[in-house]
Image (tube, rainbow, N blue to C red):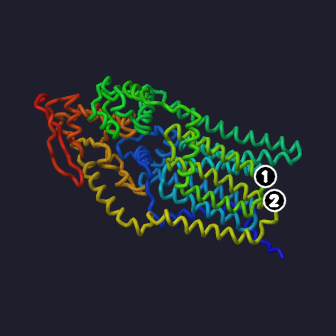
Amino acid sequence: MKVKLPVLRKNKRSVFGAAVGLNLLAMAVIVLVMRPSFETNDDIVFAEFGSGLRGVKDAHLVFQNYILGLIYRFLYQATGRLPWYTIFQYAVLVAAFSAVSYVLINRMEGWIGLWLSLALLCCFGYETYIHIQFTKTGGIAAAAAVFLLFHVIVQEKFHIWEFLWGIGLGLLGFMYREDQFWASSALMAGIGIYFLLTLRKRFRNYAIRKIGVCAGVFAVLLISAGTAGTVDSFMYRSAGWQEYQEFNSLRSQLLDYGFPGYDSTEIYQELGITREAYELYRTWNFNDPDRFTSEVMEQLVQEKSGYTIRPEQALNFTKRIPRDLSKLAPVYYCGAFLAYWLIFGKKTRAAVLSLLGETVLLWAVYFYLYCQGRYMVNRVDVGLWFSVCLVVLWLISDSGDRQPHMDAVAGRTAPVLFVAVLIASQLLWIKDWRINTSSIPEARVSQRAVLETIGTDKDHVYLAKSGMVSEIVCYGPFDRMPENLLDNIYWFGGWECRTPGIVDKMREHGIENPYRDMINNESVYLIDDQIDLTMAYIHEYYDENAEAVFIKTLGNVDLYQIRSESRA
């Protein structure tokens, strides 16, 4: 006797409420169990530009869209007592995960969609809510948007509010990280393949109408993204920002993808770059606008051997990728969903072809990343595998909606899948459980005391070598950043160090070139843990008689002043 599963949904409003409520509750539980942190320094710099921690409030975020920068500025101006950068990012993530839950609950009978949504949250909620990173958020939002928009397209009735929800999510994904938006959206093509293949079984007029709706929906998304991209480009039209964009592109190719080896080329000798200079530049202490210019960087970039796509290279990559993917947790999550589909899903020709197409596309995306030097980067991988999981879930949900064989056995298996994924996830979660990270708040307070001591000493300007003092150690995602606290400290590296806003603030303190302008400047303290290397650089390029004078130790850092009798 067939057992009829209880039906969760009654109408779209109740499904929407269930989806949002489920994800709000899941987010709260995850954050209460574990301690959130920023995965990279980039996010905390974006938060600084919104809150004004460094005295610079700027909507030019370089890697995020200018419109997002305006939103952050507005929120921080409304009340700077709240960590709006994190709150807004969490809101986008809740909206994205809720969209996926909404679609799954609508497309599946009983409680299966809800349990699969919870399993997906166990897979990706940890990576997004606990290790916060804007590229991940962009990828999650983009994939969820395409997932929701395909649901809008295949329904008999077009619902404008679902459409706007999907377009809004897609636009936010684009504004968070454009490159990730395209990659994650492209990997949703498995659903597109399935959609087109299943249309062949319908009446011709129906198929033509649905293809037209599909084209129109995604045209709106692309036009919206293009408009946001145009606005962003327009806001960088000034000479200062154009110069910075050129610098940052070259900087990224060297700092993110590696310098040419010092002993493997004669270019360094031709450019007058000593080994000490090479060591400083490649360790993110490159802020010497007189020596490490865009022209110098361009010659170093040209010296690097570029990737040439050759058959043997593709073959080597194909042999390597299974071993590399075996180290990624999302791969196993995707495998769990695939196993569920193999057991309970309908293995139609369209489904098999869509998965084959998805596999080929995934290989192509990873090969591109391999050639570009962005291979196996966690913040990129999370968005890619979220897209692949959504494609598999679409196949599961479609077979569940159209066939009665997704019966009580499948319904009882869905919570088992959730529990299995939850238990397996603890292998990753355990290191971020609050009970295991109890020392972080104390360390954060200790490091923050150093920064606050520096920040309240407005009689001095502090120049810090890369990694010596870091806001990411001192401020967590939900900590309030006091406005203007660190308007007297500047770093020798970081993508933001040559943005027009930071450059203008440094000039107000009489500093254009940190290496040069700190010599015999009584108001400048240097924070350094490799003072001999720094002095060798200064002796070579600026003052052979300069000396480092130890001033004091502040917390865990040493302070120096650089003095020279030749400039007295």
Residue 306's disc number: none
Q: In the image, is residue 367 above or below residue 334?
A: above
Amino acid type, mark 1 = Gln
Q: In the image, is residue 513 above or below residue 136?
A: above
The location of residue 496, given as percent across then percent down, is 39, 39
Describe residue 22's horizontal placement relative to residue 529 as left or right.
right
Disc 2 designates what residue? 402
Describe residue 72's horizontal placement relative to residue 458 as left or right.
right
Relative depth, front residue between 2 and 70: 2
Indicate the quadrant where residue 207 lies. Answer: top right
Distance between the alpha carbons at the discs numbered 1 and 2: 13 Å
Indicate the quadrant where residue 107 lies. Answer: bottom right
Indicate the quadrant where residue 565 lies. Answer: top left
Question: Label 2 near label 1: C-beta < 8 Å?
Answer: no
Disc 1 element: loop
Disc 1 designates what residue? 155
Number of residues whose C-alpha sits closer than 10 Å to that of mark 2, classed few (under 14), some (14–19) or many (20 or more): few
Relative depth, front residue between 217 and 17: 217
